[in-house]
Amino acid sequence: MRVLDLAFKDIRQILRDKQSAFFLLIMPIVFTLLFGFAFGGFDSGDDDADPRLPVGFLNQDAGITAQRFMGLLEQSDVLRLVTPVADADALGQQVAEGDLAAAVIVPADFGAQMEANTPVPVTLIMDPTAATAFTIQGELETAISRLASALQTARISADTAVAQGQLASEEEQRAYFADALTRAVTAWQSPPVQVRASSTGAAAQTDSTAVYSDNAFAHSSPGMMAQFALAGLITASQVLVLERKSGAMRRLLTTNMSRASILVGHYLAMFIMIIAQLLIMILFGQLLLQLPYFQEPAATLLLVIASAFFAASMGLLIGALAKSEEQAVVYSLVPMFILAGLGGAWMPLEFTPLSVQRIAYLTPIAWIMDGFKDIIVRGLGLESVLTATAVLLLYAVILWLLAAWRFRFE
Amino acid sequence: MKLFDVAFKEMRQSFRSLTGIMFMFVVPILVTLLFSFLFGGAGEGDSFTLPQTSLLLVNLDEGELPDSASFGGNMTGNQAFNFSPVASMGELLVQILQGDAFADLLTVSVAADAAAARLAVDNQEVNVALIIPANFTDALLLPEDTAVIELYHDPGLTLGPAIVGSLINQFADNFSAPKIGASVALAQLAETGVAIDEGLAQTVIAEMTAAALAQAQAGAPAVVVQPPSGITREGNLLSQLLGQILGGMMIFFAFFTGAGTLQTILVEEEKGTLPRLFTTPTPIPAILGGKALGTLITLTVQVTVLLVFGRLVFGIQWGGWLPVVLAAAGIILTATATGLLLASLVASTRQSGVIYGGVLTLTGMLGMVTIFTGGQSSPAIKTVTLLVPQGWTVQALQTALNGGGAVDLLPTWGGLLAWIAVFTAVALFRLQRRFA
């Protein structure tokens, strides 16, 4: 009972500090929304809205070949052509201001040079460091490549017709060539070999889950939850520092409460606080961000408990090591930055080289991220989070033992 | 002189604080180092490294190429391939993907059946499985047949599947071109009354195949990528990225430095040292001015150290010297004015914890949204960032980073001056009333 009394005393003390609400709830929610919005969070909300990337298209070539090129680009599932536009400078400005994802400028001699098999480059105005740069350039190259192929087809078709004694006049040859080009461009709408992407079985089996890999919050929600579970330890560890500085802990030792009970009491307070924080964040994710945390409630709960065990042990260690409130802040925030950054809370680890990914999995944050993503993105169940849970519990035990070893009661 | 005495006292106090040093220098540099490590890789040079994607190939192709079919030489122009004789187009695709040309992008292995491959993806043993269908060759040879290559991937991944998808689409197009060309040409010839015998059909198919191979050898079509107006970044991709991150961190924590340093007004007021100081012959404006000057100097040191560190260690090209100086001055002055305003608004150090911890974090993150998005923010989001002073300082620094000149910075500087003037005026009014 005394352990519980001590834990509830700590929790009351933590909740009385207004700073706690910021670190425990407001900041993780704001950051989740911010990162989610930044990476395309809620769309316009209009289901009929075209989700493709808006790309300006300035055609300086009035010929049929350039028109066919435009037709090929219009078939794209990724790009949405925006025409007409004023001039190249205005286009560049629109790209710079973010109104357009990119802009394509087709030069005046594009068609003639393509027909002569001496292609001239198409200008693509875009920020080469943008996340969409790879996709846009790929789509553009595919369209040019298909146009080149269609022109080859038209050329060979027309030459064969002439060789077969058809097409007496140049006019007939031109018309035949144009017809062949149109047919070939149309044929590219449904090529004989197509590539279809699909994703893992568990996610694909339920329609409701399949869409969550497209939810921009599927990364920011678990990421910020993991990061701010550590930030929330600032106040909790400061309570320990204050208790030690004020002599309250020494007085506590004069009671019949054992040192182990004191440690457990403080640990329990941090554990309850983090559990509450994580559960509120999960409710927020489920109800407002439409992330399917409750699809596998047992898996989610297990991961929440394991994460709380780890974070609370970390908090106890910080409280054990910090000699002042200032140190408690530093000892909380520095590991938070390092573990969150390295563990993939800010951006997916898939963007990093394999060597970095291996190092990242030495951090508990990477395991928390992996566990939650298994549930909300991959649609997996309890079994999938067992490894993550085991790793987090191992971290919790190690950190707890370190905290108990270094804990100063006086 | 008293003004400078107070200023140097404030500065000394700031640089003696462990937390101050952490947030001024250690955390911004640490976070930038982390990103440098994350994107550059561990000991893999200082350029952006695309991560390798593990690809599991399943070739179910049962078709057979006719004896007359031959593929040799160079399929993608930039990359050399030496093919062994192949029995089907599926084998050819496997050989291409296993070639040295893609060794930097892909780690390729082969599985016997589709179910095992999908299971390997489900178990996250590989990133992507590519299943070549049984009728792949037939789809490329027979008139009515079509085939679908399945790209089965972990839904938690986006970049790797996108890279593999782009490559496979390119090959699928190269393979499809002869069939599309031949079917279009032969249908058109037939419509004009030409009798299509096997010899003519073979000739057309051979010409189309040769043309497709020639096109594949020519490599990717020419596309000139041109950054939009106002963006003429120097340096490699990694240093550009690190410039955004270190710049963002510098701005974020500069506002904490401004507020934290001027928090001494509250601390000294509560301790009673400030009222005692006011009883000395030193005029109140000199005392408060000294505190503001101390903050300005502290911020100047912080911003200068981070800019120089970024240039020397991370190779960040911050921009021309004048735009960078203007942007830095904007950051320093705005952070100081914000610190003054907060010190004038907050009544006690207890309140200041919430204000400094919460408000500055919220406004700081809001101002940095354009950094998170890598410049891909919508106009609405960009406008929202300008609701806070941090957004204007980020805009000033980004203008310099993007190669903008001093003239390009003028509108942003106008906005910054407005923030500085309003904040300083309100702060002076309230502090005069408080200490009158």
Image: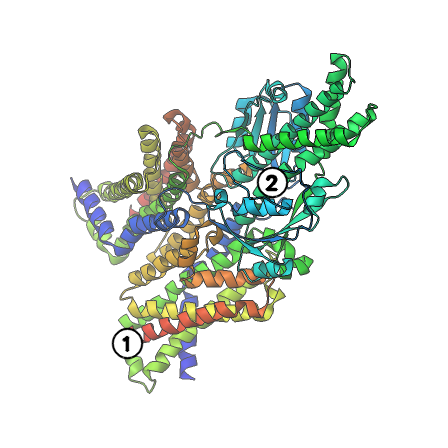
State the separation of the CA atoms marked 1 and 2: 69 Å
Q: Quadrant of the N terminus of chain A?
A: bottom left
Residue B283 image position (x, y, % from top left): 21, 42
Q: Kindly identify which residue carries mark 1.
A: A409
Residue B415 image position (x, y, % from top left): 42, 33
In the rendered view, how is the structure colored?
A: rainbow
User: Which amino acid is tagged 2?
Assistant: Phe
Q: Nearer the viewer, residue B133 or A10?
A: B133
Task: Please name the residue shown 73% across and 13% down the image.
Answer: A170
Q: Nearer the viewer, residue B165 or B250?
A: B165
Q: Chain of mark 2?
A: B
Helix, strand or loop at mark 1:
loop
The image shows a total of numbered marks equal to 2
Q: Does label 2 lie on the same chain as label 1?
A: no
Q: Nearer the viewer, residue A24 or B70?
A: B70
Helix, strand or loop at mark 2:
helix
Q: Chain of mark 1?
A: A
